[in-house]
Image (cartoon, rainbow, N blue to C red):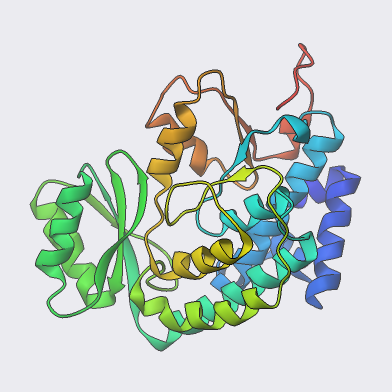
Amino acid sequence: MGKDFDASIEVAKQTFAQADSVLGFDLSSICFNGPEERLNQTDISQPAIYVTSIAAFRAARQAGLIDQTAVSAYAGLSLGEYTALHLAGVFSFEEGLKLVAARGRYMQQAAVSSPSGMVAIMGADHAAVEQLCQDHADGQVLVTANFNAPGQVVVSGAIEACERALKGAEAKGFKAVSLKVAGAFHSPLMQSAADRMAAELAKVNFQPARTMVYSNVTAEPHGDADSIRRLLVDQIVKPVRWEQIMVKLVAQDGSRFVELAPGRTLAGLAKRINRRLPIESLATAEALVPSPSGRGIG
């Protein structure tokens, strides 16, 4: 993850080195070399994604592909909300990295303490998935966790409840896939992590956002510092309303969208809302090569 940025772009290399210094361990080595099992663990994957995204942003800005003064809004799915808030000037790179690292640790610990999981359900609307949760909870936690795109909703809960939901979804003709995650993120089973994150967030002096940032919990722009802190705590145990955020952004005629590294998952979700949506992906360092037209990303 991010190895091509580090190898070819100096400002990205500096970003990874800065992260290693802040964290006090060699995060960059795990990002670049694995092992994959360690990189995919929540306590590592969260800071790894945060750092890689910001390295990509800094590289694109330096290359003239992003005019930060022209950006009208930021949004990030789950962990990505921290990246969005940093880019909007709410907290520094270092403060955000420490918060993300703590979030990853606490969510990993909560997951270990309670066997749980997540299941993606495709082809069902919101009401149908809510009904699946009611029908298959059987006294255990089973809730909607991510409204990702039209026809794609993720549920989260106790491992046995997730297994029942998967079978129940398939019986109704929906496609269902168990996700390779540590636990039931965005569910009440993460309450211990949310409580501990409240204390971490209280330590950071948030600044007013210079650019609009959308909240995962409300699908509305963030407000003042106290509200941001509260919603970041709530985000750990409540569903991510990514589809609703994207519908609002897509409705802004003439907007262009940029997805930061790593990956192209968000672009794929956005295309489910509007196939013709102009999205530019910075998933690789190669994507930073200016186009023949010289058009930048704003």
Residue lying furthest bottom in this view? Answer: 113
Image quadrant containing the C terminus: top right
Left or right: where does residue 264 sit relative to residue 157?
Answer: right
On the image, the x and y values in percent for residue 160 come to: 22, 76
On the image, the x and y values in percent for residue 78 come to: 50, 57
Image quadrant containing the N terminus: bottom right
Q: Is residue 280 visible?
A: yes
In this rendering, the answer to whether 180 lies above or below 12 is below
In this rendering, the answer to whether 188 lies above or below 168 is below
Residue at 51% across / 35% down in the picture?
267
Residue at 55% across / 52% down in the picture?
222
Which image quadrant for residue 136? Answer: bottom left
Residue at 42% across / 77% down in the picture?
190
Which image quadrant for residue 59? Answer: top right
Front position in the image: 280 or 214: 214
Front position in the image: 21 or 205: 205
Residue at 50% across / 63% down in the picture?
231
Tally of marks: 0
Left or right: where does residue 154 sit relative to residue 285?
Answer: left
On the image, the x and y values in percent for residue 148 come to: 38, 46
On the image, the x and y values in percent for residue 213 come to: 59, 47
Q: Is residue 36 visible?
A: no
Front position in the image: 199 or 291: 199
In this rendering, the answer to whether 296 lies above or below 156 is above
